[in-house]
């Protein structure tokens, strides 16, 4: 039986997901789409062949043709939709962040544990990126020994003027928080945030974050959201006996006029296109097999709580210790 997916949110990300489900994901079909803007929902429905469209995400969740829900609506609406999916017993893939704050993430965890079934996946799509997955597999092989450092770089071509330093953390660096936890299989024990040019600097679009992991490894993350030249994400794991670097480049290299060149993706949708597609396919397979994959509600909570600590480190200029509560066995 094909799984009927309902997508909440017909903006840039919701539209992309709807098109992928309609064209590139096996074992599922796009059953419905919703958006507060009726014309936008109708437009994506017509483009993708979605059978139903709504202005109310709650009506989409309740609809009988919808077996599973993808939440790509504005961030502050995520928690209510995820909780409604849990009440309806429907699997849900929620774009990051899982919720607006750690307390709301906790409410979701409590509801999922009470439901007794893993229904929530968080859209930290990098976990499905072939290059990051290969880095983790190589580290786990043990051939290079333990990881001692992780260097991360995260550049966006440009960000809107209202994108402030706290958003650099909660919107962009939160992916680095998740990928550090994923690659190193450890929680972040402490965070320090440096503002290049000093805390009084007028430029608030670049930050250097340092994470001390529970494993003893140290992570540095440079985020610059107005880098100009394109979207660029890099990572290198330094191990006891070698290093593992992420190289997601396409196989095509242009040599012309005395230069060798590679294209730089304009944004994360292009850079992580394979990861987004594999995430959707992995989610559908997980629903069919009953074996969860990807980031859990717990991972969504840990990322939000750690990002909150980083915001505190930014505001105070101090090293902030992070002590998460014990992870429920349910998420083992
Ligand atoms: C954006 O919201 C994302 O989620 C991208 O993955 C991230 O790389 C980018 O910096 C964010 O603004």
Image (tube, grey):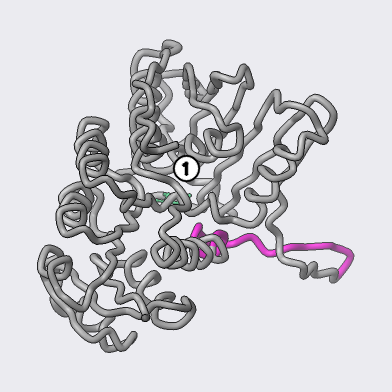
Q: Mark 1, residues whose alpha carbon is within 10 Å: few (<14), some, or many (≥20)?
A: many
| Image position, residue 114 (x, y; %) | 21, 41
| Image position, residue 61 (x, y; %) | 17, 66
Q: Please tell me which residue lies in front, 91 or 181.
A: 91
Residue at 14% across, 75% down: 54
Please determine whether, in this image, residue 97 is positioned above or below residue 316.
Answer: below
Q: Residue furthest right?
A: 258
Residues shaded magenta: 257-272
Q: Which residue is mark 1?
A: 175
Quadrant placement of the N terminus: bottom left
The answer to whether one can see residue 192 in this image is: no
The answer to whether one can see residue 37 in this image is: yes
Ligand 1 contact, mark 1 (Cβ < 8 Å): yes
| Image position, residue 172 (x, y; %) | 44, 43
Quarter of the view holding residue 89: bottom left
Please determine whether, in this image, residue 239 is positioned above or below residue 258.
Answer: above
Please determine whether, in this image, residue 274 is positioned above or below residue 199.
Answer: below
| Image position, residue 38 (x, y; %) | 13, 76
Residue at 82% across, 35% down: 143
Residue at 34% across, 20% down: 312
Q: Is residue 80 left or right of residue 205?
A: left
Quadrant placement of the C terminus: top left
């Amino acid at each position: 039986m094909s799984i009927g997916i309902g997508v909440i949110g017909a903006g840039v990300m919701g539209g992309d997901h709807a098109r992928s489900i309609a064209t590139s994901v096996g074992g599922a079909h796009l059953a419905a789409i919703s958006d507060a803007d009726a014309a936008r929902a109708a437009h994506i429905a017509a483009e993708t062949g979605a059978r139903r469209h709504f202005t109310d995400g709650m009506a989409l969740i309740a609809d009988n043709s919808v077996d599973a829900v993808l939440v790509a609506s504005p961030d502050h609406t995520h928690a209510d939709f995820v909780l409604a999916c849990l009440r309806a017993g429907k699997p849900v893939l929620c774009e990051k962040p899982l919720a607006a704050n750690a307390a709301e993430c906790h409410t979701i965890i409590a509801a999922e544990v009470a439901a007794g079934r893993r229904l929530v996946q968080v859209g930290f799509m990098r976990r499905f990126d072939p290059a990051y997955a290969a880095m983790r597999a190589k580290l786990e092989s043990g051939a290079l020994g333990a990881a001692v450092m992780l260097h991360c770089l995260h550049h966006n071509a440009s960000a809107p003027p209202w994108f402030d330093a706290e958003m650099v953390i909660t919107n962009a660096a939160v992916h680095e928080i998740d990928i550090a936890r994923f690659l190193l299989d450890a929680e972040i024990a402490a965070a320090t945030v440096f503002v290049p040019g000093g805390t009084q600097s007028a430029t608030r679009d670049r930050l250097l974050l340092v994470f001390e992991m529970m494993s003893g490894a140290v992570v540095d993350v440079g985020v610059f959201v107005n880098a100009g030249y394109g979207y660029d994400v890099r990572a290198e794991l330094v191990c006891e006996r070698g290093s593992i670097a992420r190289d997601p480049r396409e196989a095509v290299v242009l040599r012309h006029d005395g230069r060798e060149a590679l294209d730089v993706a304009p944004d994360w949708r292009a850079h992580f296109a394979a990861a987004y597609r594999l995430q959707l396919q992995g989610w559908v397979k997980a629903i069919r097999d009953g074996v969860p994959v990807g980031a859990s509600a717990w991972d969504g909570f840990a990322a939000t709580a750690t990002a909150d600590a980083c915001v505190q480190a930014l505001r105070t200029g101090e090293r902030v210790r992070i002590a998460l509560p014990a992870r429920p066995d349910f998420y083992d």
